[in-house]
Amino acid sequence: MKATLSDKALAIVKKMQQNELTESYIYEAVAGFAKGEENKKTLLRLAAEERSHYEIWKEYSGFEMKPQKMKVLKYKILARIFGFTFAVKLMENGEEAAQEEYDLLAQEVEESIQIKQDEEEHERALLDMLDEERLQYVGSMVLGLNDALVELTGSLAGFTFAMQNTNLIALSGLIIGISATFSMASSEFLAARSEGRTDALKSCSYTGVAYLITVVLLILPYLLFESSQFILALFCMLAIVILIIAVFTYYTSVAQDQPFKSRFWEMALISVGVAVVSFVVGVLAKKFLGLDL
């Protein structure tokens, strides 16, 4: 042990040591299935960096440690579902909360602040080197997601009062949703081709898949509830809209280092606002046209 530390400082050192070791295992695990040789090399370099930091803290604590298996499993699952860039950036963002602990530790371990600065600068540079395909097409996914949320949310809200039958609403929404999926995907393909891009097919695929998944999720409540429970289905659909926006906005905010709150409220207000207007249109249409489905 390099120096005699207070109990509080020793506890912080041991915590940091544990985190460094666990994260080195996470980087190694994610590197095992990450696509692209450069991405694998970068992740393995990050793993080596974390392991070297572990060794530094071990000199102060005097303890050998084992990785936290559940934490390793958690980030492996996140990397599989949301991509390795999201997983590792989420993990690194969690370390920023340790600023106060570093400041406290600096009173007894002078080089701790320098270690933290070196970690942040080097690891951030390495993280920025990651190049994941799905992040190259976030714009295409946003296009499909936003269009589906605005268009289908408005349509389903309007149909809800005009038809007052979950089966009819689901059928109408499905027809509109599938047609719009092909329309949006083909528009993205033509736009990409007109720009001379060679990835037009892949771009339109991301747009179409994002649109179709959104369609299925929004129609789902109308398929699950009884035909007379159209209002309940409407509120569930709106809850799903908010959930989709929250999850996707959080994903992009972490993976692309973008603000969460402003983007979330912008998308949520637009989608819910369109739904409210469309619902009113449905009410007026039913009243003045005298239709009874």
Image (cartoon, rainbow, N blue to C red):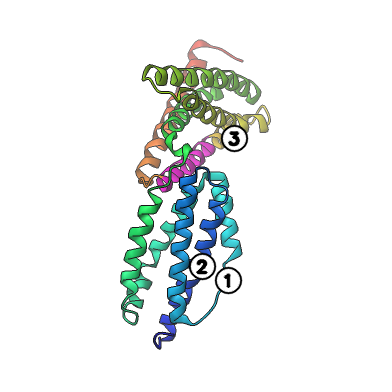
User: Which disc, if any, is residue 234?
Assistant: none
Q: Quick check: marks 2 and 1 in contact, CB under 8 Å?
A: yes
Residue 253 is covered by the magenta coloring: yes
Please state which of residues 249 and 65 is positioned toward the viewer in this rendering.
65
Q: Residue at x 39, y 64 (%)?
A: 97
Q: Earlier in the sequence, mark 2 or mark 1?
A: 2
User: Which disc, if any, is residue 21?
Assistant: 2
Q: Earlier in the sequence, mark 3 or mark 1?
A: 1
Circle 3 Cα neighbour tier, 10 Å, few/some/many (<14 / 14–19 / ≥20): some
Where does the image place residue 198, in percent across and percent down from the top left? 43, 23
Question: Is 73 placed left or right of 264 in the picture?
Answer: right
Q: Amino acid at mark 2?
A: Leu
The CA distance from mark 2 to mark 1 is 7 Å
Q: Residue at x 35, y 59 (%)?
A: 122
Residue 252 is covered by the magenta coloring: yes
Tell me which segment is drawn in magenta.
Answer: 238-255
Q: Which residue is mark 1?
A: 66
Q: Amino acid at mark 1?
A: Lys
Q: Amino acid at mark 3?
A: Leu
User: Which disc, if any, is residue 232?
Assistant: 3
